[in-house]
Image (tube, grey):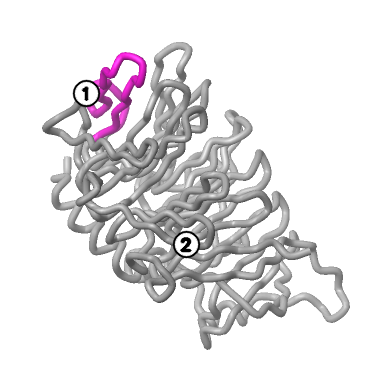
Amino acid sequence: MENPSVKLVAMVVLLGASAAAMAAPPETAKTAAARPRAAVGAAVPKMPRFRFENFTTENGLPDNHVFSVLVDGGRIWAGTENGLAVYEDRKWKTYTTADGLAHRAVLSLALDKKTGDVWAGTMGGLSHISAGRIESFNQLNSGLSNDVVYGVAVEGEHVWVATAAGACMLDLHTGQWSLYNERNTPMNEIWVYSVSAKADKVYYAVWGSGLLEYTQATGKWDKYDDPDGETEMVLFKDQGLIHEIVTSVSYVDNIVWAATYFGDSRYDGRYWHNFLTKDSGLPSNFTNTVKGVDANRAWFGTDKGLAYYDGTNWAVYRPSLKDGKPEMTVRDAAGKVTEVAVATAPAHNYVLGIDFQGQDIWVATAKGLSHGIRQP
């Protein structure tokens, strides 16, 4: 087993830098240009269009490096490298360690829809924000697995946590913690990136250990692996999880969407479908985050832009790889790509977080937070 501290250093470097050298070869301006283009006059699939407004330190963010975003009704929470920011009534307020935040770098966010409380996973523990007050948990004062909290999810009376040294769960009713690691689950590695929880199942994305599934009714764990092993080559198309290095998971409408650094997967409980740049509209196989809309639709945050899949067609939103100008492309089921004229784009191509506000979308990037306002 690798030393988690070594991995942590690697992750910190990764989050702050371009991932091109660590991913499968990403799409470039040259390869994008080589894709088949839709014929003039051909019908273009109708895909969501947005007017993006971008937030940086110039208009209130405490830091431009935004790891996570959470929609809380009319409030928007942004986890940055230098504090937890909340946007309300077009004004920003920032919570720092001076307010009780566990650490200034906020990696993940979750909303307790029953109470309205917010949970923030940081580089130094887990923080609970309730009515403006902050209570923080770490390894010294609680049963938290590790102080580096990459993912958090709230389901009912349980807070599920993904950390750099295993997973854990806090029972809000009893105050008791349960720990999950290589000793009592099928995970081989214990570097847990992401969690998605519903009343029936909980899914954990684990670096180098695939996807873990916990069935709430039985307490049973299952594990899904890449049938090709931990390699960049895909030998068996749609035969299982695309890769062992799973970075994000989203469970919605009984469908699992899984993101990895080497492509993405959809699992319906029986069949897998995998997505790669060579046979889909993904702008890059290096995917930091996935957010499912329903059983057929999902958003993907990559190191080369924001992508949307409607079950058949793809759309990509980003500053152009060639000249940095706003760009939107649509790829139909036949693989034809059409450029759509747009005036705005997300703040940066390196996308780390996604959430929805009605028909609008909020996007956390390496150089700012973006609000995509849905257009007719």
Residue underneath mark 1: 183
The residue mark sitting in front, 2 or 1, is 2
- How far from the left and from the top, in percent, is residue 174? 31, 14
Mark 1 lies on a secondary structure that is: loop
Quarter holding the N terminus is top left
Considering only vertical position in the picture, is 50 above or below 262?
A: below
- How far from the left and from the top, in percent, is residue 332? 74, 63
Q: Earlier in the sequence, mark 2 or mark 1?
A: 2
Amino acid on which the number 1 mark rests in the picture: Arg
Q: Is 299 within the magenta?
A: no
Which numbered disc covers residue 350?
A: none
Nearer-the-camera pick, 39 or 150: 150
- How far from the left and from the top, in percent, is residue 54? 51, 71
Residue underneath mark 2: 91
Residue at image location 58% in from the left, 61% down from the top: 307
Q: Which residues are magenta?
A: 166-187
Considering only vertical position in the picture, is 65 above or below 300?
A: below
Residue at image location 27% in from the left, 61% down from the top: 82
